[in-house]
Image (cartoon, helix red, strand yellow):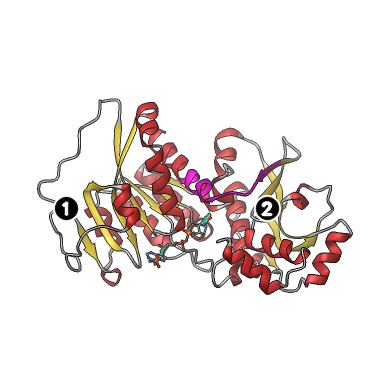
């Protein structure tokens, strides 16, 4: 864009990055708030400065401003007047969704980093895969909270990132930003993961807990929706698809095996009645939607299904929106991570930490 010059307002030790946000729902909004809150610390203690140069979603349209948008204006949605599909005003490009082209949007925003947080498509991983590919091809780092691309296009995207000398990072895709992928990648070199089990889906955990307390399935689901945990159409959670995608992502990255979703034995929680949930709790073996994966020769056997878990098992202890994963490795026979009642900040933090990893390594 004519007249654009990069800002050189910082000392030489500080690097500045243009950040773009694709999908502007709960996660990316929380990320903008967190970046805004930590801006000074990032710059003064880590030498990382940023400006927001792109925001896009179906409703927002595709907005680019290489001079930078303030966190306040993107969060308030007060982004000025639309100048027409694909038109370029002095500083801003607005385009209604139907005219969008991710590549030209990233170009107009001069993106250095893309934060991808569009909705999960469990079956194909699209359009998030295309978004991440476009960012990497442009030479931007690609950071996502979306597990679809990890399951459906991990090899291709990692190879592209390597060719481009950029990072593809996805810490927030499983367990809301708890360091799982980076734990194995950065802190447990050479450790072999033999298997894991866990409770990885909040909606089903909230529903099962509600039924134990006497609510019907539908009332428990409504409670999960009121908590903001379950979507209006919660069938991906209830039928175990969301958990299966998480299992496939963990198996692909941490165990090196590509599983199709249909390879994962999957049963949701529709068959668990209120009476069964209360009886299971009364006998000290509550129902949980348990995710499992276990190495079997060169492949991995994996399942997602409701199981009764004894109270002595760490999986029985997580309630509501909390989650847990218990890893079995060749060096550490049992290694558990428990995430207690995470908020959106946890997911946003995973993406912020990925950003710092991408630009400092
Ligand atoms: N919420 C969490 O706690 C959490 C935790 C870990 C991971 N994740 C993952 O993070 C991602 C985002 O979650 P969220 O809670 O932020 O969802 P959300 O609030 O529903 O936001 C999704 C955003 O993606 C946009 N979008 C969907 N399809 C699009 C497309 N084809 N092109 C452009 N924009 C599109 C939506 O646009 P419109 O609103 O305009 O339709 C919306 O802005 C999901 O993949 C989710 O699985 C979420």
How far separated are the C-alphas under marks 1 and 2?
A: 54 Å
Label located before the other in sequence (1 or 2): 1
Asked whether residue 165 is in view, the answer is: yes
Q: Residue 66, position in %: x, y?
A: 22, 48
Of 280 and 200, the residue lying toward us? 280
| Residue 229 versus residue 169 in the image, above or below | below
Q: Residue 351, position in %: x, y?
A: 46, 46
Of 14 and 191, the residue lying toward us? 14
**Residue occupied by mark 1:** 91
Q: Residue at x 63, y 56 (%)?
A: 247
Tell me the element at label 1. loop
Task: Inspect the magenta stretch and tell me whether residue 189 lies in it.
Answer: no
Asked whether residue 305 is in view, the answer is: no
Quarter of the displayed picture in which ligand 1 can be seen: bottom left
Q: Residue at x 71, y 61 (%)?
A: 303
Task: Inspect the magenta stretch and tell me whether residue 341 lies in it.
Answer: yes
Q: Residue at x 69, y 65 (%)?
A: 207
- Kindly give the residue lying farthest to the left in the view shown: 3
**Residue occupied by mark 2:** 298
* Left or right of residue 34: residue 265: right
Where are the magenta residues, as a range?
A: 336-351
């Amino acid at each position: 864009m004519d007249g654009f010059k990069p800002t050189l307002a910082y000392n030489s030790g500080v690097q500045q990055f243009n950040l773009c946000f694709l999908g502007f729902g709960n996660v990316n909004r929380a990320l903008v708030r967190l970046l805004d809150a930590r801006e000074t610390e990032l710059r003064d203690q880590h030498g990382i400065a940023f400006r927001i140069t792109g925001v896009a979603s179906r409703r927002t349209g595709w907005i680019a401003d290489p001079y930078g948008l303030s966190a306040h204006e993107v969060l308030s949605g007060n982004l000025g007047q639309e100048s027409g599909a694909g038109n370029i005003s002095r500083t801003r490009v607005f385009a209604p969704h139907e005219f969008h082209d991710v590549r030209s949007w990233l170009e107009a925003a001069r993106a250095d980093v893309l934060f991808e947080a569009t909705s999960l498509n469990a079956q194909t991983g699209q359009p998030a895969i295309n978004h991440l590919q476009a960012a990497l091809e442009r030479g931007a780092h690609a950071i996502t909270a979306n597990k679809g691309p990890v399951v459906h296009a991990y090899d291709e995207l990692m190879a592209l990132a390597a060719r481009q000398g950029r990072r593809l990072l996805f810490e927030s895709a499983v367990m809301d930003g708890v360091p799982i992928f980076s734990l194995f990648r950065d802190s447990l070199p050479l450790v072999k993961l033999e298997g894991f089990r866990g409770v990885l889906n909040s909606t089903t955990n909230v529903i099962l807990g509600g039924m134990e307390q006497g609510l019907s399935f539908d009332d428990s689901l409504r409670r999960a929706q009121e908590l903001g945990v379950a979507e209006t159409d919660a069938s991906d959670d209830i039928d175990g698809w969301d958990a299966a995608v998480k299992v496939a992502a963990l198996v692909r990255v941490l165990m090196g095996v590509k599983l199709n979703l249909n390879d994962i034995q999957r049963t949701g929680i529709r068959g668990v009645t209120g009476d069964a949930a209360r009886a299971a709790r009364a006998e000290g073996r509550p129902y949980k939607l348990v995710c499992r994966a276990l190495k079997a020769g060169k492949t991995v056997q994996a399942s997602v299904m409701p199981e009764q878990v004894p109270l002595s098992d760490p999986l029985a202890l997580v309630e509501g929106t909390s989650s847990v994963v218990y890893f079995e490795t060749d060096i550490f026979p049992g290694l558990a991570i428990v995430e207690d009642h995470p908020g959106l900040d946890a997911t946003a933090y995973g993406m912020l930490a990925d950003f710092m990893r991408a630009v400092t390594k």
